[in-house]
Image (cartoon, rainbow, N blue to C red):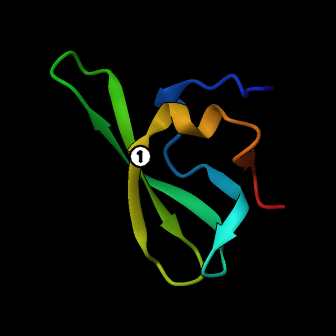
Amino acid sequence: MPTHRLNPNKLLMSKWTSTSPQQKEKHFLVTQLIRNEADMVVDCIIEAVINRNQYQLPWQNLTSATDWQQGWK
């Protein structure tokens, strides 16, 4: 399974396209990074462009090329 190489510190305001959109939510923007006590990024908040719904997920989920494409496609 192919994966994207990502620097979690550079994810803020990056654009993503879901390869399996739910409720027409296809394009997303990373709006927040959640860090642990060691200042490591553990999760991110992504916001659907179409309706501004927000979801929290581990940033590593974005490395799955089967689920996400970098940029808006």
Can you give x and y, in whole percent of width and height, for residue 54 in the image? 40, 67
Seen in the image, is 68 located left or right of residue 33? right
18 w.r.t. 11: above or below: below
Seen in the image, is 70 located left or right of residue 44? right
Residue beneath the point at 56% across and 59% down: 29
67 w.r.t. 7: above or below: below
Q: Residue furthest top?
A: 38
Q: Residue furthest right?
A: 73
The residue nearer to you, when weighing 11 against 26, is 26
Can you give x and y, in whole percent of width and height, for residue 59 in the image? 47, 36
Q: Residue furthest left?
A: 37
Quadrant in the rendering for residue 50: bottom right
18 w.r.t. 63: above or below: below
Q: Amino acid at mark 1?
A: Leu
The residue nearer to you, when weighing 15 against 67, is 67
| Residue under numbered circle 1 | 57
Seen in the image, is 53 located left or right of residue 3? left
What kind of element bears circle 1?
Answer: strand
- Neighbor class of circle 1 (other Cα within 10 Å; few <14, some 14-19, many 20+) is some
51 w.r.t. 57: above or below: below
Residue beneath the point at 69% across and 22% down: 5
Quadrant where the N terminus lies? top right
Residue beneath the point at 41% across and 46% down: 57
